[in-house]
Amino acid sequence: MPVIDILDLPAVVPPFAPVVGLDLGEKTIGVAVSDLNRSIASPLELIRKTKFTEEAQTLLRLMGGRGARGIVIGLPLNMDGSEGPRCQSVRAFARNLLKLDDTLPIAFWDERLSTAAVQRLMTSEGDLTRARRAELVDKTAAAYILQGALDRLRSAGF
């Protein structure tokens, strides 16, 4: 299955199957998961980047354990909406993941400022140490990305 538009996701993911959201960082992959109704996203896991095959196997194992049947990947567009080298890297990740499992529907979601928004929220909380924030930011950003996509689907009537 090729990468699809976010609005096509409900048509190809079975009812009551969660979807995962990914925030692909330089050193880690933040993973979030939706509930069965696809209305709430929650941070799930942080995958340390090593080799693509190991990362992908960890992700697919997490998805299998949760019964997740779709993926929303944050696309780091530039502020003017153009795509830079980081977008190319994210698209390459999706292509490589599809080579391992071509049945997974994958959609992209504009992630501009998601990490900054999450960091601002965590800083305002005040009770998190810098080390704890660093540990939480990527998987929380994945939840922020996934929640944005879920909210868009809900506003479109899905």
Image (cartoon, rainbow, N blue to C red):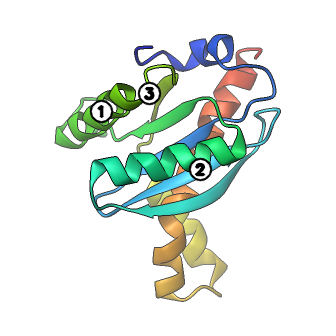
Query: Which disc is residue 62 wearing?
Result: 2
Q: Are marks 1 and 2 in contact (CB under 8 Å)?
A: no
For residue 140, which numbered disc appears in the image? none
Mark 2 Cα shell of 10 Å, populated few (<14), some (14-19), many (≥20):
some
Q: Residue at x 47, y 15 (%)?
A: 4
Mark 1 vs 3, N-terminal side: 1
The quarter of the picture where residue 54 lies is bottom left
Mark 3: few/some/many CA within 10 Å (<14, 14-19, 20+) = few
Asked whether, in this view, residue 154 is left or right of residue 9, the answer is right
Q: Say which residue label 3 marks.
A: 101
69 lies above or below 13: below
Q: Amino acid at mark 3?
A: Asp
Q: CA distance from mark 3 to mark 2?
A: 14 Å
Mark 3 or 2, nearer chain start: 2
Q: Amino acid at mark 1?
A: Asn
Between 44 and 123, the residue placed more toward the observer is 44
Q: Is residue 136 above or below residue 150?
A: below
Q: What residue is pinned by disc 1?
A: 96
